[in-house]
Amino acid sequence: MLRYILMHKNIAVADIDIDETLGGISRIRSIISKEHLPVGVVRMQCQNETADRYAFNQWWTGRSIPASRMGLSDMLDTLGIESTNLLLTKCLGLSLSDHYWGKPYESNMSWEDVNFFDNDFSDDIGDLLFGTNGKISGFDLSSPDNTSDGNLKKRWKVIDGKRCLLKSGSNPYSQQTFNEVIASKIMDRLGIAHVPYSVTWINDEPYSVCEDFVTKDTELISAWRILQLRTKANHENEYLHYVDICKELGIDIVPALDKMIVLDYIIANEDRHFNNFGLLRDANTLEWLGAAPIFDSGTSLWYDRLTSRIPINGVNCKPFKKMHGEQLKLVSSFDWFDISKLNDIEDEILEVFGGDKAALYIDAERAKVIAAEVRNRIDTVESIAMSHTNNYDITSTEGDVEEDLAESYEIKMD
Ligand SMILES: Nc1ncnc2c1ncn2[C@@H]1O[C@H](COP(=O)(O)OP(=O)(O)OP(=O)(O)O)[C@@H](O)[C@H]1O
Ligand SMILES: [Mg+2]
């Protein structure tokens, strides 16, 4: 067992033991600062608020690279380790998305000494994940890549002094990388707060690049963690569960969700799961600041469909409804939606897909079909916005849409 103090910047949060053979938390010796515990480790309504070791351990091991990450098995083979949990202590659990870390017991390190926002980090884990590390031993494992989430191949890299996340797409089109740029352009036009993405090429393969939107003072708390704050009440659907908890935290999240839902409708996003959006929190005062800017919108635009199958099969929808048409009904207000802002967006889409190298992945026909489908979906949003009456109360206990409405929209939408 190794003893650590779980820290939130320079605040001591909990005195814990980490099992170095499994990489999990084997014991919580004491809670030092209840306020600074990771969100959702203690539920809001618990009378006798003690951190639950299971939840605590889920949170800690959930910081590690998921087992489903592309390129992981080669890296684990090279390092000769069984599980990515074991890498967490190698970087003191530090991340570039929040401010938690584990301080070896009795060490006198400070946040300033160790955080990756200011301090350099090793390229070894990133190189291993990208298959570009020539080393066979002597690895420096201190990297925020050990605490990055998500399935696509990715790494943090300092570019021009800025912490940037580089992320691949998947075969055969690598389309997610281009989609991130297209989603950024749509959000630029519509005035939706988002993380800007661009594409870079490494060994003739495309990667999306975005800057770290988390700073030394603000951190990302995923919607999934927010939902852990309390169980869903009987009258709540998934949407209301999230909206209500945000309200309890002092945030009216509805306008931001309206925008996210409309964006995801337009780009036919298939993967807006609860770890792909969230809130920002002031890491010093713990004040909730509002919705995090939109990130990870690449799993969209029929990214893995044969061109001939776009858009014949309905696309998946997350997180609130299984169908995009249904989810769009959760939007409270379209007042902000100005279709004229999206004039000729098709041209920008064609431009992104039409770059010399991009065209090797996305042919002209595919690009055209996607651009035309995006236009169809924008027009559908507009017609719904025009006839939107706010007829149903999304905060009512009914939550879900009435049958007859569902039928009439279903024809137009997926
Ligand atoms: N610009 C950023 N700044 C800070 N943290 C980020 C940024 N982009 C992503 N993250 C964090 O990294 C995680 C993984 O990134 P991302 O969601 O883009 O990857 P992914 O592989 O596409 O994920 P998924 O498994 O959802 O497909 C995010 O869930 C978020 O916690
Ligand atoms: Mg993601």
Image (spheres, rainbow, N blue to C red):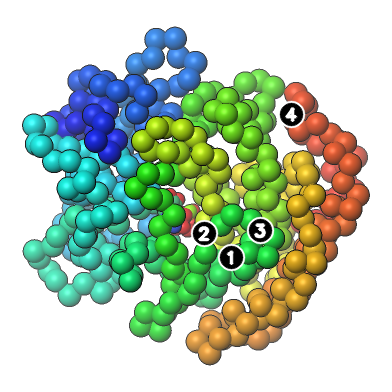
- Give the position of the N terminus as an image quadrant: top left
If you read the primary sequence from the N terminus, does the residue marked by circle 2 or circle 4 appear first? 2
Eye-nearest disc, 2 or 4:
2
Residue 409 visible, this orientation: yes
Q: Position of residue 184 (x, y in %)?
A: 58, 65
Marks 2/1: CA–CA distance = 7 Å
Mark number, residue 395: 4
Q: Position of residue 209 (x, y in %)?
A: 44, 68
Marks 1/3: CA–CA distance = 10 Å
Q: Position of residue 131 (x, y in %)?
A: 28, 71
Task: Report the residue marked by disc 3.
Answer: 191
User: For disc 4, does the CB lie below 8 Å from ligand 1?
Assistant: no
Residue kind at label 1, given as amino acid type: Ser
Answer whether labels 3 and 2 touch (C-beta < 8 Å): no
If you read the primary sequence from the N terminus, does the residue marked by circle 1 or circle 3 appear first? 1
Secondary structure state at the residue bearing disc 2 = loop
If you read the primary sequence from the N terminus, does the residue marked by circle 2 or circle 1 appear first? 1
Q: Going 46% across and 69% down the picture, which residue do you hit?
A: 208
Marks 4/3: CA–CA distance = 26 Å
Mark number, residue 184: 1
Secondary structure state at the residue bearing disc 4 = loop
Eye-nearest disc, 4 or 3:
3
Q: Quick one: 76 or 255, which is closer to the camera?
A: 255
